[in-house]
Image: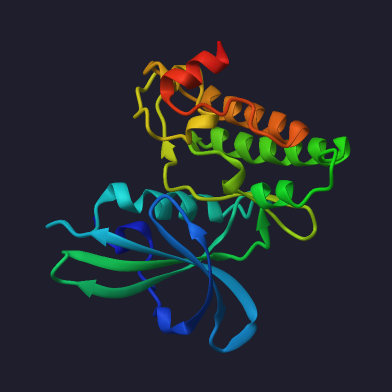
Amino acid sequence: MRLGELGLESITSPDNYVQLDVIGNGAYGTVYKACQRTNESSFVALKKIKVPLTTEGVPMSMLREISTLKQLDQYAHPNIIRLLDVCHGRRLEKEHQIVLFLVFEHVEQDLATYMQNCPPGGLPSSTIKAFTHQILHGIDFLHSHRILHRDLKPQNLLITNEGVVKLADFGLAKTYDFEMRLTSVVVTLWYRSPEVLLGCSYATPVDIWSVACIMAEMVTCSPLFPGVSEGDQLDKIF
């Protein structure tokens, strides 16, 4: 599949941005804090991914995040991270890969960092309620568009300085059909639902399970089910 088929004909150059610091690693690549070369006070999150090429161009599986965010961005939902730009990097001939840069709005921290920095005693109940409401608001929006996030965890929930929660890292999101059987490796272990662990068919409830685990973690400031393997995870749940 080619980029033009996603409505991304106006691909810009990564030279428009200056990489500053490494923020972290997502499902498909490294994320940098960056700024626009023409406006150094305007920060963005620059996600660098190396995409394997096929005879048809960029594989559809690797374009899932781009197409999902492109679809969602038109609604400008307050709890969904915005995709601002897509940059076409260099082609790696020996590796049969191409480098793409996804430019997102920059958000100051994620929920994992927020919880680490909270004072003893955990988050205030008012904050937990506000964050949970916003997470569910974002998830309801995704599900109403027949999209599963499938990788909800504190590291993928970004928190602005104003306390707005934004769902990020759609590298594993997928438009779903009811009763579809999806891969069992899509969700970080601690937040996997029983049906994922057991290899059963599943749909939107897998995201709700993850949200409940995250909500409990906000209350206690420790993971609810910190399993070390799939079997151990099931033992902790049941």
Left or right of 36 in this view: 131: right
When the figure is inspected, residue 228 is found, relative to residue 110, above or below; the finding is above
Quadrant containing the C terminus is top right
Q: Which residue is the extreme one toward the bottom?
A: 38
> Which residue is at 35% across, 27% downward?
182
The residue depicted at 37 percent of the width and 33 percent of the height is: 185
- Closer to the camera, 65 or 192? 192
In what quadrant of the picture does the N terminus appear?
Answer: bottom left
- Residue closer to the observer: 71 or 190: 190
| Residue 115 higher or lower than 204, as above or below | below
The residue depicted at 61 percent of the width and 66 percent of the height is 106
Q: In this view, does 90 lie above or below 204?
A: below
Residue extending farthest to the top is 238
Q: Is residue 35 visible?
A: yes
x 39%, y 80%: residue: 13
Camera sees residue 178: no
Which of the 4 quarters of the picture holds residue 76? bottom right
